[in-house]
Amino acid sequence: SLVARQRFLQSTCIFTRHFSKTSQSNAKVAVLGASGGIGQPLSLLLKINPAITKLALYDIANTVGVAADLSHCSTVAQVTGYEGASQLRECLEGCDVVVIPAGVPRKPGMTRDDLFNTNAGIVRDLADACAQYCPKAMICVICNPVNSTVPIASEMFKKRGVYDPNRIFGVTTLDIVRSDTFISQAKGLDVSQVNCPVIGGHSGTTIIPVISQCSPPVNFPLDVHEKLTARIQNAGTEVLEAKAGTGSATLSMAYAGARFVGSVIDGLNGVDGIVECAFVRSDETEAKYFSTPLLLGKNGVEKNLGLGKLVDIEVDLIKAAIPELKKNIEKGEEFAHAGD
Ligand code: NAI
């Protein structure tokens, strides 16, 4: 049983190390939409990140129970629950990172843009509160349509005069997680060693896997390459249909969100070489916001690593995505200024 105990301790250690490369931190992280399908497992994964000492859970319903439940896990983070708009300020004050999985998810047959009418207002109000109560925090937007909600959040920060483009991220990590998984399966590789950038936006054809830059390098015949690209672009719909009306991707999104927040915190802690793709304000293409690999640091985006070398099919995918991206971005910006 001593051997079993040692094994258990080792596995716990590996598990926590996966989410953070440093344990010297006292980050306060808020999850807005913490009671939801993504919010609950995401909060659980953040609770086991040793770099997080304060975990503030906010939702319009059910946070008291979720916070009580999570607070019994024997890890360092102190969990507090906040319910309803009157408690949002207290939740946000002192935050280093805010992650936003609030909002309605897709049902089968819906596009991410179909969520705009409901979710745009949610992100507008939550981002405005962040701009007031934690203007320096790293804002990680999960709520869809990400191509529009990131511009909305950015405009709200501008309105309060506290905008820093290096601190507002659309979380696209699930697209990377999916491409790493599918590629490793196709090639029989150890998935923990596979890293394939996914650039562009986070909806349908704006999701652009850059398989030519995969590490380790992989090669597919053109038809297989195209099928793989299409599967990565439609993977969200694959889950939506499998769940048959009961929800969209929640567990894999929680996993991806916890990885992204862990990387942002590692950056804040000065860990070298932390790179993640995310949808940010960008000068890399004609679209004002675009996802590319980013070097993360103490002030958020330290350096945009850009598009890199692309093959013809990838260049064509970007060209095809730009009009849709521009439309989504403008729609978000217009919404944010509708009442001005
Ligand atoms: P859900 O409906 O299970 O949970 C949403 C939660 O948000 C609920 O607990 C609800 O009470 C809360 N909420 C609603 N309005 C709020 C407000 N004003 N303030 C705070 N909380 C509020 O939905 P689920 O499955 O967790 O999805 C959440 C969002 O994440 C959706 O917009 C979905 O499209 C998006 N998503 C994004 C992905 C990405 O890759 N970026 C992947 C999967 C989903």
Image (cartoon, grey):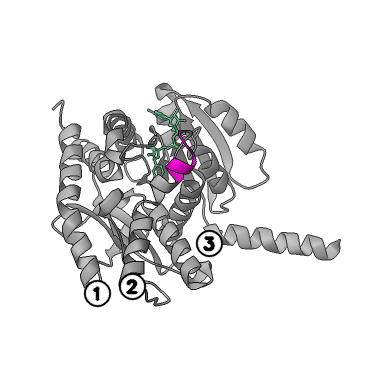
Residue labelled 2 has its Cβ within 8 Å of some atom of ligand 1: no
Q: Earlier in the sequence, mark 1 or mark 3?
A: 3
Looking at the image, residue 14 sits to the left or right of residue 239; the answer is: right
For residue 213, which numbered disc appears in the image? 2
Name the residue tied to disc 1.
309
Q: Earlier in the sequence, mark 3 or mark 2?
A: 3
Q: Quadrant of ligand 1?
A: top left
Looking at the rendered structure, the secondary structure element under dot 3 is: loop
- Camera-side mark, 1 or 3: 1
Q: Is residue 62 part of the magenta span, yes or no?
A: no
Residue situated in front as seen by the camera: 255 or 114: 114
Name the residue tied to disc 3.
22
Looking at the rendered structure, the secondary structure element under dot 1 is: loop
Q: Start and end of the magenta stretch?
A: 239-245
Distance in Å between CA atoms under marks 1 and 3: 32 Å
Above/below status of 273 relative to 82: below
- Picture quadrant where residue 218 is located: bottom left
